[in-house]
Image: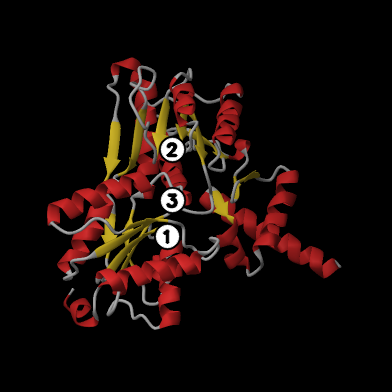
Amino acid sequence: MADERLFAAQRHERLLDELRRAGAVRVRELAELLGVSELTVRRDISALAARGALTKVHGGATLPMQAERPEPRRARSATPRFTIGMVVPSLDYYWPPVVTGARTAATAQGVQIQLRGSSYDPEEDRRQITRLIESQQVQGLLLAPNVDSERVDGLIEWIGGLQVPTILVERQAPRWTPTTRQLEWVRSDHALGLELAVRHLVEQGHRRLGLLLSKGSPTSVHLERGWVAACADLGIPDDFVVRESVSLDAPGHRAIIAGVLDRCRESDTTALIIHSDPDALSVQQYCAEVGIRIPEELAVVAYDDEVANLAQPAMTAVRPPKHQVGRLAVEMMVARLVEGRRRPTQRVLVVPELVIRASSVVLADALRL
């Protein structure tokens, strides 16, 4: 029993060291770092949260509020100190680089970030935002609400009417209203990112492509817009679009993938663009099981580049500029707080990057890159 307590104490100290270094940690990454199960990490986080050593959020943990104080401002800096609230839907996928970018900019600007985790649920979004407002400690909000629900109009109207400046992060208001005309946002230009993938595959000689969109993702609408625009510009068909989640934990994913591959054969489709990485990995694994060679028989491009490099072969992927989006959000908020109503409303798109790997080029072409 003493040895078990000692091992737990060692884990706790290692976890806190990593938290002090990064400002936020994810359960999955900690499990790999510590060599234990994710369940063990969650228990450790709960124990440390009960002691007030950290703040438990969805998918991980952050520094407690008293530990998030910014470094002392340099005497020559005229930037006042502010506290900015930030609510993101997850710390387990996609969002950690966004949060890291925001924290990096906050340190440089001499401001404090109060991070809250939500869960892609509009009511939870409201709860977390309300908590920050009622604390009377934040002067601005960086929000990533669920804009893919039937209740989105009411939520966006409510956000637009808040008494503190608000910037949407990796989101935008779905439509214009008088309440939202001053609402700002910064997000990745996902439509352009999808166009980069289409043009890359056409340059590789593919003329019939397919698009798999992760069901229920707020990114899908932008990806489909980029798909239609790119296909029209290049004069290729745009009718092969599947809106289903096919990640390994999605119900019925194998049957859906089998249907997609059958459709590829029937239509002579030779390349797929798949959102997101877990879905692309699932498709690639199924192809390996049934003997479909990637990229020789089917080229694959993933969208998100979270874990695409871990595939075999490594997958070409579109990488949204997550860190830059987080950094710009903080910089925009500080400018808004300093300049007030004099500053024009800004809505910023940041261009993604196409990372070319083995899943979309045959060996001879790869050697020429």
Amino acid found under the numbered disc labelled 3: Pro
Q: Is residue 141 left or right of residue 77?
A: right
Q: Is residue 202 left or right of residue 191?
A: left
What percent of the width, then of the height, locates residue 32?
Answer: 58, 67
Residue positioned 60% across, 47% down in the render: 58
| Between marks 2 and 1 in the image, the one whose residue lies nearer the viewer | 1
Residue positioned 18% across, 77% down in the render: 365
Q: Name the residue carrying label 1.
A: 306
Amino acid found under the numbered disc labelled 2: Ala
Q: Secondary structure at mark 1?
A: loop
Q: Secondary structure at mark 3?
A: helix
Q: Residue furthest right?
A: 1
Q: Quadrant of the C terminus?
A: bottom left
Give the quadrant of residue 340.
top left
Amino acid found under the numbered disc labelled 1: Glu
Q: Name the residue carrying label 2.
A: 106
